[in-house]
Image (cartoon, rainbow, N blue to C red):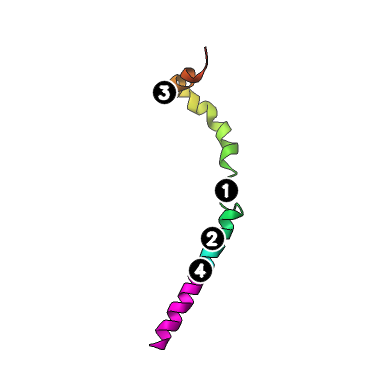
Amino acid sequence: MSVIYILITVSIVVAVVFLLAFIKAVKSGQYDDDYTPSVRMLFDDELKKSPSKIIEVEKQKPI
């Protein structure tokens, strides 16, 4: 029975360590997306070619 208490304690400690490592990675910007904004401008013209998008773009332009 004492082995179960040891295993539960060790598993909780390991879970807390992984949680702290995840929080540190998020705060340091590990999961920030730096690639998509640079590629988005390459596909901007394709979005304007579809008829529904052209209407939306024309509505946004001031007269």
Q: Which residue is mark 2?
A: 22
How far is disc 2 from disc 3 in space, using C-alphas?
41 Å
Residue at the spot x=42%, y=82% of the render? 5
Q: Measured from the top left, where is residue 36 in percent x and y?
A: 56, 40
Could you tell which of marks 3 and 1 lies nearer the N-terminus?
Answer: 1
For the residues labelled 2 and 1, the Cα–Cα distance comes to: 13 Å
Q: Which residue is mark 4?
A: 16
Q: Amino acid at mark 1?
A: Asp
Given contact means CB atoms under 8 Å apart, are the residues at marks 2 and 4 in contact?
A: no
Q: Quadrant of the N terminus?
A: bottom left
Q: Marks 3 and 2: in contact by CB < 8 Å?
A: no
Magenta residues, start to end: 1-15
Residue at position x 48%, y 21% from top?
57
Residue 42 is left or right of residue 47, and the answer is right
- Which residue carries the number 1 mark? 32
Dot 2, how many residues are within 10 Å of its Cα: few (below 14), some (14-19), or many (20+)? few
Q: Of callouts 2 and 4, which one flags the residue occurring earlier in the amino acid sequence?
A: 4
Tag 2 secondary structure: helix
Residue ID for mark 3: 52
Name the outermost residue toward the left: 1
**Would you call the spot at circle 3 few (<14 residues within 10 Å), some (14-19), or many (20 or more)?**
few
Name the front one of labels 2 and 4: 4
The quadrant where residue 55 appears: top left
Amino acid at the residue labelled 3 = Ser
